[in-house]
Amino acid sequence: MKNIRNFCIIAHIDHGKSTLADRMLELTKTVDVRQMENQVLDDMDLEKERGITIKSHAIQMEHKGYTLNLIDTPGHVDFSYEVSRSIAACEGAVLVVDATQGVQAQTISNLYMAIEHDLEIIPVLNKCDMDNAMPERVEDEIVDLLGCKREEILRCSAKTGEGVPEILDAIVERVPAPQGDPNAPLQCLVFDSVFNSFRGIIAYFKVVNGTMHTGDQVRFVNTGKEYDADEIGILKLEMSPRKEISAGNVGYIISGIKTSTEVKVGDTITHVARPCDKAIDGFEEAKPMVFAGVYPIETEDYEDLRASLEKLQLNDASLTFQPESSMALGFGFRCGFLGLLHMEIVQERLDREFDMDVITTVPNVSYNVYTKDGGMVEVHNPAGMPDLTEIDRIEEPYIRASVITTADYIGPIMTLCLGKRGELVKQEYISGNRMELLFDMPLGEIVIDFYDKLKSISKGYASFDWHMNGFRPSNLVKLDILLNGEQVDALSTLTHRDNATDFGRRMCEKLKELLPRQQFDIAIQAAIGAKIIARETVKQVRKDVLAKCYGGDVSRKRKLLEKQKRGKKRMKQIGNVEVPQKAFLAVLKLD
């Protein structure tokens, strides 16, 4: 055990984690030259196309007689749950900071997460070979942040490989060996799982105490299910089977599990014959922040969609879903995501990996609604709102947002955040002309397009990170859309009273363009409760009944028009309005 080192690489987006991992794998000859490519650990097409890491990946390397288990982690704030799981399976972390950009928001939040778990931090300055690198200035920032000595910071260039051997040596010297007793009862922490259509579900685990052998009978503590360990092994680029895995090491287990609900990330594996006294404290459940309905385009694909979501959930534990139905879209699921990028990635993966065509409704957040009789309801979508007369108050989730930027962009960023009902908590200089701004903001306001706007007004220089900061009472209203007096539930939204009139008016105008004309007038109305706040009318299609009248008495014309009017009235009573699919999608893209 004293020769094992478990570590992860953490950093802000695009600071070069995956490239550094590539160089380490090359140096330790873990990956053959023929198999080597850029971002070798990012095995999803999506990751390669976008140049981002979505999943954390574990791989084992050998260096100077030591076994190094590396976990490469994502940098985007939407995938911070992956980072927390990686950190729980490690004893050390390599903190990578870009020498051209300096410390950014996600660097700080990932660092605090690692410090909470008592990890040994190795600060590394990457991209030192670039012309616009500022190693001295960025080193000052790291010393301020970590309180470490200047000589502890390692400089490297992940692209050229310069300085990487020193990092590997530092990992061996500074990261402590895992604690644990190979002879104690077995305790393993499950930190990830994947679905394989031939082998069933493969769980990845870290052995905390004890030793696991091939063929052992094991039990998953939380679910209470028992299995035979058909194959166990360690994670190289491919899975490589072993006879036994002992304390401190990271490996995988294949035991023919077929249903996805039987493996939970954060669960403990132990022996049936000699179980451990208590389960390991796993990670806290991921709290979804953004909710959206996901519906199959063809109603008969509902069960296929459920199976696809279950398989996806194995690989992405932060995705939650429950069944729901809508008058307009039929049966589907209300899914919880960690953010908008996460939602986009899940939609894309459903399409690529499972061939599912889905429609996603307007994303929203969850609200706490307090009723007059003292009860509290959690509302995820507007259809679940209690009656207006029963509501005492509504509380919405607030976040503490940290924006790090240069002083040039402070004006526009302030305007953006205050326009989204944000409150400035404090602003301070970090170093030079870089500032950190802290805001308290409603989560509902940043859900739709806040991040994109922030990036464009700061020309990509502002970095953004946030965490939950409790619930606060808020003046929210339910905005309904009525077509000829009939409510369309899929178009209802919860919004702040100040924005409601403007939003309702824009929605009516948009629907007027999209609804096909009928034989009768269609009234499109936006309403809050019983009060109509906006209206548009789609004019009826009329036949020219006066075409055959040339001259003659006006009463003949009036008679024909009256007859047409009676027909239209009767038609309106029996006619109903079909809302085309593209109308729902257009409302999503209203901003």
Image (cartoon, rainbow, N blue to C red):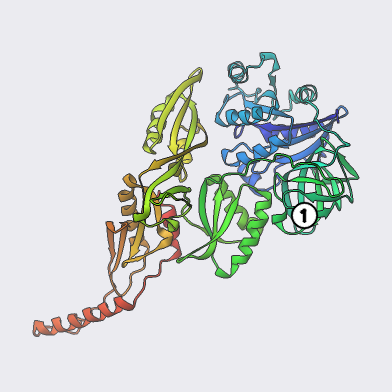
Dot 1 alpha-carbon crowd within 10 angstroms: few under 14, some 14 to 19, many 20 or more:
some
Q: Which quarter of the rendered picture does the N terminus lie within? A: top right
Residue 428 spot, x, y in % from top left: 47, 21
Q: How many marks?
A: 1
Residue 471 spot, x, y in % from top left: 46, 40
Residue 59 position by quadrant: top right
Instruction: Check disc 1 and give the amino acid type.
Output: Lys
Residue 5 position by quadrant: top right
Residue 66 spot, x, y in % from top left: 85, 29
The answer to whether 430 appears left or right of 389 in the picture is right
Please report the residue visible at 44 percent of the width from the left and 54 percent of the height from the top: 588
Residue behind mark 1: 225
* Secondary structure under the numbered disc 1 in the rendered image: loop
Please report the residue visible at 58 percent of the width from the left and 24 percent of the height from the top: 102
Q: Residue furthest front?
A: 373
Residue 160 position by quadrant: top right
The answer to whether 303 appears left or right of 444 in the picture is right
Residue 106 spot, x, y in % from top left: 58, 32
Whether residue 528 is visible: yes
Decide: is 262 above or below 107. below
Whether residue 236 is visible: no
